[in-house]
Amino acid sequence: MKLCLTTTLLTGQVTPYTRPDTFSAVHKLPRRGKLHVDAEGIVGDEHGDPRVHGGPDKAIHHYPYDHYRYWISVYGEHPLLETPGAFGENISSVGLTEADVCLGDILSCGSTLLQITQTRQPCWKMNDRLGDATTARHMQDSGRVGWYYRVLQPGVIEAGDAMTLVDRPHPEWSLHKVLQLLYHDTLNVEALIRLQRLSLPPSWQKLIRNRIELGEVESWGKRLDCPPIDGPLQAATGDV
């Protein structure tokens, strides 16, 4: 079943970010022609902080261009919202959102096979990028976060390639439902136990296990809120 067409493919290079000793590759640019994909993602794409970005379980980030209309309604005519790439995505598409795909879905794109591993957990770097200290929390609360793929079969992709659903092992776990559990119905132990049975990345296994065993939700403050800084921010757009 064809789900959508990739409208834009993007990659980025690591550069200094907005605060001292911080780096990011969130400023991703459109790529043309055939792009090679290996287990780490699109060849040539980089990650500013490998501790939390990239790796096999977050090899490729997909963000729906469908959400841009909403963000324009929030921020107005922001220069970063004029074209795909505002959210550091590798794949931009129209017609596919978190409500349409499920955890574990396997999709073909070009000659690759990709599997949805997790939703994005937005961080404070999005606050600096869009110039609003609440952006990351707004993304999380609204469920407009996008998702990550692992690469099951390396190959070649090109903008305009169809994304086709090959297998859906967990139809009961749409990403919309996952996000509701993660950020709204946070201590629904019965649902957490069901989610725990899936093949999840280690960081998610730990998060869910701690919620079940400790009966409390992990702190989101360090991830979502901007760290303090002395002096003005460096530019978070353009060449960043």
Image (spheres, helix red, strand yellow):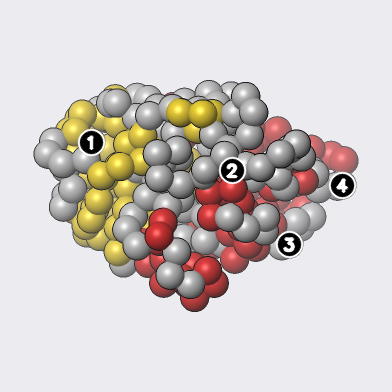
Q: Position of residue 200 (x, y in %)?
A: 56, 37
Q: Looking at the image, do the residues carrying marks 3 and 4 touch, with CB atoms under 8 Å apart?
A: no
Q: CA distance from mark 1 to mark 2?
A: 30 Å
Q: Of the residues shown, which amino acid type is indicated by label 3? A: Asp
SS state under label 4: loop
Which mark sits nearer the N-terminus, 1 or 3? 1
Q: Of the residues shown, which amino acid type is indicated by label 4? A: Gly
Residue furthest to the front: 231
Which mark sits nearer the N-terminus, 1 or 4? 1
Q: Looking at the image, do the residues carrying marks 4 and 2 touch, with CB atoms under 8 Å apart?
A: no
> Mark 1 highlights which residue?
112
Q: Which mark is residue 125?
A: 2
Quarter containing the N terminus:
bottom left
Q: Position of residue 71 (x, y in %)?
A: 49, 67
Q: CA distance from mark 3 to mark 4?
A: 13 Å
Q: Position of residue 10 (x, y in %)?
A: 30, 42
SS state under label 3: loop
In-image side of 38 versus 142 (left or right): left
Q: Nearer the viewer, mark 4 or mark 2?
A: 2
In-image side of 155 versus 225 (left or right): left
